[in-house]
Image: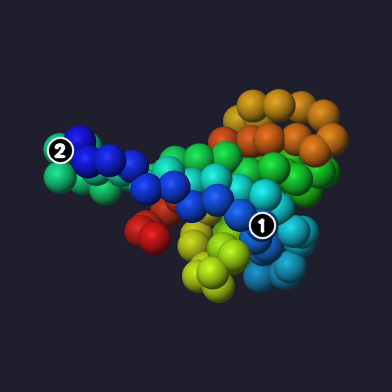
Amino acid sequence: MTDPTRFRGTGTLFVKGAEESPVEYEITLFEVDTIMRAEGWVEAGPAVLTYAQSASGAQLRLSDGRVVDVSIGGFIVKGSPSRAELIVHGGL
């Protein structure tokens, strides 16, 4: 396993192509048996995360301008703001 690389910042969540909300995020990129994996969390208002969780086609624009396809997993913290698992599809 290689040392993980972390991406953390303020980004923009898009759901079905429409800008939804500014969000805080952290993504950890690491290699396991020559396979690159990415996992992390996203923090926003509970309504935004619930909507993104139930919709398909979510994307996250990172603070450096890159856009990645994502899904919102289970909630880690419920409240305002809420934190949920961030599932990254494809690479960074």
What is the three-letter code of the residue carrying label 1?
A: Thr
Tell me where residue 46 appears, x and y as whole percent: 80, 39
In the rendering, which numbered label is found on residue 54?
Answer: none
Residue 62 in the figure: left or right of residue 32: right
- Say which quadrant the C terminus sits in: bottom left
Using residue 75 as the reference point, say whether residue 45 is left or right of it. right
Helix, strand or loop at label 2? It is loop
Answer with left or right where residue 32 lies relative to residue 7. Answer: left
* Residue at numbered disc 2: 33
Q: Nearer the viewer, mark 1 or mark 2?
A: 1
Residue at 64% over, 36% down = 84
Residue type at mark 2? Asp
> Crowding near pointer 2: few (<14 within 10 Å), some, many (20+)?
few
Distance of label 1 from label 2 (alpha carbons): 31 Å
| Extreme residue in the left direction | 33
Whether residue 76 is situated above or below residue 47 in the rendered picture: above
Q: Residues within 10 Å of mark 1 (few under 14, many from 20)?
A: some
Query: What residue sits right under mark 1 in the picture?
Result: 10
